[in-house]
Amino acid sequence: MASILSLPDELLLGILANLQFTSSGSLYNVLFSCTRLHHIAKPLLYQHVCFSETYFDPDSPLFKFSSQSLPMLLTNSFRLITSLHNNHLPDKYKPVCDMLSSAIKLRTFSLRLTSYNMLDSEGNLIDHAPTPFSAGAVDRFINALPHTLSNLDIDTAGMQAVGDFPHLCHSISELIPHLRILRLRIRRYCMDLMRRLTPQNPSRLEAATIHLDGNTDGRKPWFHRAIDCSGDHAIRSGRGWFRTPYLSTSKLARGFRQLYMEGALPHLSNFLLVDDGRGSIRVPGSHDYFRVHNICTNTTLTFPANLYGSTCTGYEMIGNAPPREIFTNVYWLRDLDGKQLKGDSEEVANFLEGTLGWKIMGNGSCLPPPSGQASVLEYCPDLSCLSVLHREVDNMEKILRPALSELWIREETIGKDLIRATKSEGVEDDAFMRESLPSGWEYYRAFLENDWCVRRV
């Protein structure tokens, strides 16, 4: 039987490249197995790089990596998972920014901020992040990116920047004309994000996904995530101070749609504006929702949602106190076919991105859909990201948000589903997500209770 070493280098390179999608340890093992495989696999080790860094110390692996010459010659994608403390001096980021600006083969950059302390399975601190983060630091990284960049991913995990300025849209807009794939999940947006684009100066964008993700704590109004910072439009409040006016999601979507129709985005085949909203306890049968505005197809897909429960995703360290569990919300959704699904916020985000989602490699690197493939992909949500939820009356007491258990009770009473995901024409749909009662039924409030019940007319 022939040995794997009998294969030519070209075939071995293709085989070893598949190890990047398993675990980084597999590729390391190959590096130290023999001289020939070490020579072939070493460039792959630098091709897709991911670092999790908190304090930006000179002795950290990230700084040692940035001081080498190989990253500037071999690195194709770079992902940084960090917290960007507001108390960091700007000089702390300079070595990394210098490395990024001189990386002549860099095509993909992914920045992910973390919002709390995280421990690994052995209890070691691997990440820490206060809230808010330094927007100036994010701005420095964006401005350091080379013109070779084709794919950009910035995810601030819904955290608030200090003062929300400098406004990141202005810096990102400088890169838009050169990008092919864009993914953003930041707190504030405005139309200046596309200010460099005109029919005379079009973009090369093939796919874009923008999450309006400023309401993860549930305390801020959902419509405060798009702002109008063009011109002098400050609004004077009753207390005498000025603020920038907010834009509705539909107005932001309409602005992007107009750019697309004018020919400023000729190569674009998928442009998703992902939004979420809340129902009102004063409106019977209204529910929270996740909404996907597809700018290119001029359609809107809306999924009813409710808070279902919570799950532990890590541990928080506060001083010398014992580690405290960190919980993330788990959501219930219903699709177009009436199937009930559940998942945490990250799983829901991946579900909504669907076929346009970025893939996580074995070493933590984050890669977009291949260039060229993104332009022909037909968007659809990825059901594999969520778990199927089997409704059981016994589980109702475990549900955090009573709106879901109330819905199930109403559906049990009537004998049919009252709400499903909807698909509508246009990108300006921002109405409440409401149940549809069959004829002959009406809502009423039970005596001395807040629950909405149903009865025959």
Image (spheres, helix red, strand yellow):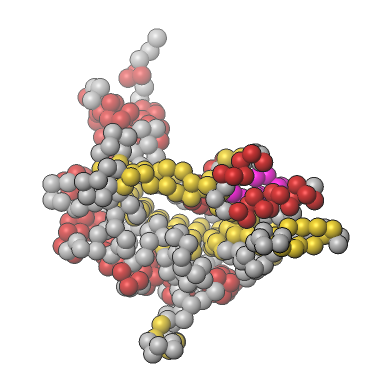
Where does residue 304 sit, x and y in percent of width and height? 63, 56
Residue 334 lies in magenta, yes or no? yes
Q: Which residues are magenta?
A: 331-340
The answer to which of 331 and 347 lies nearer the viewer is 331
**Where, by quadrant of the figure, is residue 140 drawn?**
bottom left
> Extreme left residue here?
59
Residue 422 lies in magenta, yes or no? no
The answer to which of 436 and 201 lies nearer the viewer is 436
The answer to which of 204 and 401 lies nearer the viewer is 401
> Relative to 299, is 125 above or below?
above
**Where, by quadrant of the figure, is residue 133 drawn?**
bottom left
The answer to which of 399 and 312 lies nearer the viewer is 399
Where does residue 224 sit, x and y in percent of width and height? 47, 72
The structure residue drawn at horizontal position 45% and vertical position 59%, both measured from the top left corner, is 216
Residue 263 shows in this picture: no
The structure residue drawn at horizontal position 36% and vertical position 19%, both measured from the top left corner, is 4
Q: Is residue 392 left or right of residue 436?
A: left
The structure residue drawn at horizontal position 80% and vertical position 62%, both measured from the top left corner, is 442
Q: Is residue 96 left or right of residue 255?
A: left
The structure residue drawn at horizontal position 13% and vertical position 51%, both measured from the top left corner, is 58
Residue 327 shows in this picture: yes
> Relative to 167, is 292 above or below?
above
> Relative to 276, is 264 above or below?
below
> Relative to 224, is 127 above or below?
above
Placement of the N terminus among the 4 image quadrants: top left
Placement of the C terminus among the 4 image quadrants: bottom right
Q: Is residue 118 left or right of residue 189?
A: left
Callout count: 0
Where does residue 50 sit, x and y in percent of width and height? 31, 45
